[in-house]
Amino acid sequence: MNFKTSEQLYKKGLKHLVGAVNSPVRAFASVGGNPLFIKKAKGTRITDVDNNDYVDYVLSYGPMILGHRHKKVQNAIDKALKNGYTFGASTKNEIKLAKIVCNAFPGMDKVRFVNSGTEAVLSGIRLARAFTGKDKIIKFAGCYHGHQDALLVAAGSGLATLSMPGSKGVPEGAVKNTLIATYNDIESVKAHFKKHNDIAGVIIEPVGGNMGVVIPQNNFLKELKELTKSHHALLIADEVMTGFRSKFGGAQEIFDVEADITCLGKVVGGGFPVGAYGARNEIMEMVAPLGGMYQAGTLSGNPIAMAAGIATLKELERQNPYQYFEEIGSILEVILTEKAKEYGVDISVNRFGSMLNPFFKKGAVTDFEEAQQSDTKKFAVFFWEMIKNGVFLPPSQFEAWFLSSAISERDLDITARAIDRGMKAVSEMK
Ligand SMILES: *Cc1c(COP(=O)(O)O)cnc(C)c1O
């Protein structure tokens, strides 16, 4: 396996692109070496510019839940392209996708489409403030909610991978209304509510996916809902990663908790730049043109993206792959655990449906602090061994691996063999 063309492109890319990437998570900062450049993908497989073929567990960080270039999605895109790309006026498909989304999430009567998860969340936060007339927001350490100023503190994977405590360029004023709590620790949330009477809302990834996978314990989400309700604050579910992935109705469906505001992204656009935020009528009526909260977008509700989203969600609903994800995920967990044991490597696997990852450490991971105790050097060795054996993983200990419904036994065989090689290499580290 050689990476010559990727290496050449990387060097070229450095001249006019920052680090030769357009999102820092794509840089191989913590695993070393050069980022791979991708030529194409189909189904579960992704091919780099040197024609190396991999089983893809990145899946563009989540959107490609049906695998790459699913026939029905491709057809929908081809058809939509023939009518034009963007109009600056409404189209029928926006209504269609809105209906699918609102039906999936009982807490959403209305939805607004935007162009990214970041936009969805920053709008959702603005909405919580507009509706409650209060300013403060509680977020959890290790949760990532996009790169808006106010939430770029203790923000998980991207920063953790680069060992950055927070971002430069974020003025103190922008984060002075942001309070940090500990995931799975309801007391840490209560303490904030005791101290502050101007909390507009609590934002959470209902399953943590940006510090590696971290699962809400016991009744954590239900308690959060109660707590916010009793303080006249809103629960904001950032389901950009988990929406349509954990279950068609997101993590909220699984944990039977209804958020006041739900933010979506990734899967909802079927691989195109789409985000969405929604809530019950009384909240959404705050948004312009109905209400006084302004939020807009030139390309919002883009017709090609809407077509991809509709085709993806319809096919996803038809396939209903959630039981299959559970089965495949548990097979992968067993392979990881047994191979680690065989080679005497300490790992702890967290898994939730189609999201999973091994932490290279002993003992459970239930919050960001425990995730950060992982041995990232071991991950780096494991990562490269996986690449060399035909498996494409996110290049960070703190990112989830994603499954698509296209994954096959053959993919699992390749993965199992790579994991064997990977754990062996880790066990042989000096
Ligand atoms: C990916 C992600 C975001 C940001 O979405 P972008 O489309 O990258 O802006 C926000 N929240 C969560 C939970 C995410 O996983």
Image (tube, grey):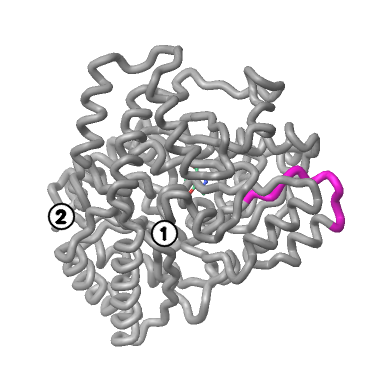
Horizontal and vertical percent for residue 26?
Answer: 38, 47
Drawn side of residue 90 relative to residue 393, left or right: right
Give the position of the N terminus as an image quadrant.
bottom left
Drawn side of residue 46 relative to residue 176, left or right: left
Drawn side of residue 419 relative to residue 344, left or right: left
Res. 400 mark: 1
Mark 1 crowd level (few <14, some 14–19, many ≥20, 10 Å Cα): many
Residue at image x 75%, y 67%? 187
Residue at image x 47%, y 49%? 249
Q: Residue flagged by tag 2: what amino acid is it?
A: Asn
Considering depth in this image, is 271 or 53 the residue closer to the camera? 271
Residue 216 lies, with reference to residue 344, above or below; the image says above
Q: Is residue 195 magenta?
A: yes
Horizontal and vertical percent for residue 73?
Answer: 25, 36
Q: Earlier in the sequence, mark 2 or mark 1?
A: 2
Q: Is residue 422 magenta?
A: no
Q: Which residue is mark 2?
A: 2
Give the position of the C terminus as an image quadrant.
bottom left
Q: Quadrant of residue 84?
A: top left
